[in-house]
Amino acid sequence: MLPTAFLGLGAIGTPMARHLAGGPFDLIVWNRTTARAEAFVAAHGARLAVSPAEAARGRAVVVTCLPTSADVASLLDGPDGLLAGFAPGATLLDCTSGDPATSRHIAARLAEHGVRFVDAPVSGGVSGAEAAALTVMCGGEADDLDRVRPVLEAFGRRIVHAGPLGAGHALKAVNNALLALHIWGAAEGLAALAKSGVAPELALEVINASSGRANATENLFPQRVLTGAFPRTFRAALLDKDVGIAADLARAARVPSPLLQLTAELWRVAHQELGEEADHVEAVRVVERLAGVTLRSATVSSAAGAS
């Protein structure tokens, strides 16, 4: 048995936790919105914790999957906090897309209580979580990673030891910054092509058979931008946060990073314009507005014609 708790039943956390329900994990769950945790328990047979402390009590592994590292840190203290429930020798496995500096601070706090920490953000989206096919980027000690590997293998297809504490979060932030860069760059390029008379469908067909292809052009644009579907699978607000972490990481490492810094600024603008609930691919709408073109129909707006 590897008694496990899961805190954070969001769009990705819920299917991740589902793979831990039953079996050797004796799963207990907690969520800030209690109704969501109650629904999970009713559907999947896990037990319900009324507080982070109760979730951590008697658990060998506590998994957190929250929007930010600050959210994880906020669960540590107080009579209902994780530190009140953790036993020495337990491990906090943080699958949040967090920031390395806060992760190292959390790890130091936990170490004072004999609790280990592994940062383990995931990539693969909701579909990857549902299929137990996530890529997991881990930071921390190799021995600590080995202890939690059975939990990771329940929802992850590829588990990578990226390096010391914070390395997993650093790698995830840079990965997502490249995603953000690809979405914005593809949107600008397709907008320019559309206004030059090249249909976006044709442009994507050529790009995806050539050296400019990326996941954004191969999957996101055909499935979401051209169709106008824009399913809400990953909030633009969270991608804004991740790009900011990558930009901060580059500055802290004294790496010249004008492209990362510009990408962070552009996504701050998109986040402000689109609001908190918009999907990340909807950032294309911002580029379309600025360019005066709609990539769904490849028609140039009257505003663009007047410019």
Image (cartoon, rainbow, N blue to C red):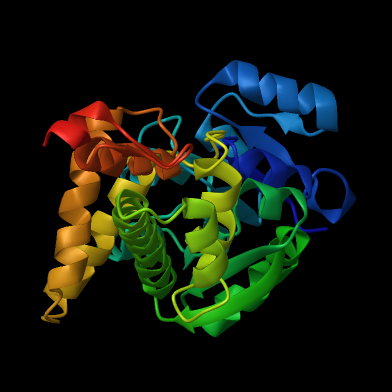
Residue extending farthest to the top is 35
- Is the residue 243 above or below the residue 301 in the image? below
129 on left or right of 80: right
Residue 296 at x, y = what percent? Answer: 48, 38
Query: Can you say whether 179 is above or below 207 in the image?
Result: above
Q: What residue is at 57 percent from the left and 33 percent from the top? A: 229
- Any part of residue 66 in sight: yes
Q: Toward the viewer: 234 or 4?
A: 234
302 on left or right of 235: left
- Residue 109 is situated, as x and y percent measured from the top left of the image, at 33, 57
Which quadrant of the figure contains the C terminus?
top left
Q: Quadrant of residue 304?
A: top left
Q: Residue furthest right?
A: 23
For residue 125, above or below residue 234:
below
Q: Position of residue 290 (x, y in %)?
A: 20, 39
Question: How many numbered discs sit on the rendered protein?
Answer: 0
* Residue depicted at 29% across the width and 57% down the height: 243
**94 and 121: which one is in front?**
121
Q: Which residue sits at x=30%, y=27%?
A: 275
Residue 215, percent from left and from top: 53, 64
Residue 101, relative to residue 5: is it above or below? below
Q: Residue at x 68, y 55 (%)?
A: 128
**Horizontal side of residue 148 vs 154, given as left or right:** left
Let me know if residue 87 appears in the view.
Answer: no
Q: Quadrant of the N terminus?
A: bottom right
For this rendering, which residue is in front, 290 or 54? 290
